[in-house]
Image (cartoon, rainbow, N blue to C red):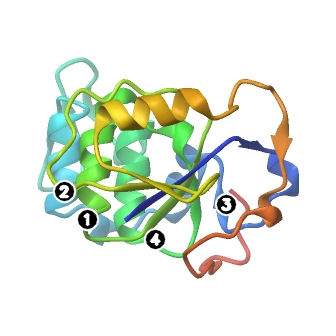
């Protein structure tokens, strides 16, 4: 299930269980076994590149690149499959990653904050999003857009991370790393 809290947090007041910077977190935490079928799918469909057998990526735009050079969207979605018990900054997922996110959330509980309105082109069947702001469940892209626009996410106010009742058990799997 995908759990979304609409709003921004003061990043310096958030616990280490909040991944605010997916690029930095991925580059610090990445493990080779993350380069599985899911990573290959994301790199192919989001970054329009190919995962090579040696862990490098063949990009039509950049040539051969390191896994640290893939898009923030792909990095975030790869981490969401591999690191659980944290809250992600959903602003790190571009419009082209939402279909994959909804598919992944059918298999894993994912919690995230969101402060922008994504353009979700395809809504996979049986996908459900729970908005933590009011506990409503959403079943379509149209409902998602209507709900998101109805919530006050443009006020510029920052919210208290600790005031949210997160429906997942938050665990800091890397207490010595701040991302």
> Which numbered disc flags the more N-terminal residue, 2 or 3?
3
The residue labelled by disc 3 is 18
Residue that badge 1 annotates? 106
Q: CA distance from mark 3 to mark 1?
A: 21 Å
Instruction: Give me the C-alpha separation between circle 1 and circle 2.
Output: 8 Å
Q: Earlier in the sequence, mark 1 or mark 4?
A: 4
Q: Which residue is mark 4?
A: 83
Q: Is residue 54 visible?
A: yes
Q: Nearer the viewer, residue 49 or 158?
A: 158
Residue 46 position, x and y percent, is: 24, 34
Whether label 2 touches label 3, CB < 8 Å: no
**Residue holding disc 2:** 126
Q: Nearer the viewer, mark 1 or mark 2?
A: 2
CB under 8 Å between callouts 1 and 2? yes
Label 1 neighbour load within 10 Å: few <14, some 14-19, many 20+: some
Task: For marks 2 and 3, give the one nearer the viewer.
Answer: 2
**Quick one: which residue is furthest to the top in this view?**
61
Quadrant of residue 66 within the rendered picture: top left
Can residue 116 be seen here? The reply is no
Label 1 sits on a secondary structure element that is loop
In terms of sequence position, does the residue under pointer 1 or pointer 2 come before the other? 1
* Among the 4 quarters of the image, the one containing residue 45: top left
Decide which of tag 3 and tag 1 comes sooner along the chain: 3
Q: Would you place residue 85 above or below residue 92 in this image?
A: below
* Foreground pick, 21 / 57: 21
Residue sitting at x 26%, y 65%:
106
- Distance from the alpha carbon under mark 2 to that under mark 4: 24 Å
Picture coordinates of residue 35, whole percent (x, y): 24, 61
Instruction: Find out whether the residues at labels 3 and 4 contact each other: C-beta distance under 8 Å.
Output: no
């Amino acid at each position: 299930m995908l759990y979304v809290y609409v709003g921004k947090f003061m990043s310096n007041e958030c616990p280490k269980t909040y991944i605010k910077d997916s690029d930095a977190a991925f580059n610090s935490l990445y493990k080779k076994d993350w380069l599985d079928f899911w990573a290959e799918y994301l790199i192919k469909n989001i970054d329009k590149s190919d995962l090579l057998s040696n862990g490098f990526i063949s990009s039509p735009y950049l040539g051969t690149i390191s896994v640290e050079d893939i898009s923030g969207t792909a990095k975030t979605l790869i981490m969401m499959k591999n690191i659980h018990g944290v809250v992600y900054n959903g602003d790190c997922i571009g419009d082209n990653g939402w279909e994959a996110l909804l598919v992944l959330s059918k298999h894993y509980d994912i919690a995230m904050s969101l402060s922008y309105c994504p353009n979700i082109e395809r809504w996979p069947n049986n996908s459900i999003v729970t908005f933590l702001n009011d506990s409503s469940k959403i079943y379509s892209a149209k409902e998602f857009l209507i709900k998101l626009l109805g919530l006050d996410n443009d006020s510029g106010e920052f919210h208290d991370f600790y005031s949210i009742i997160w429906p997942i058990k938050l665990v800091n799997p890397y207490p010595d790393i701040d991302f």
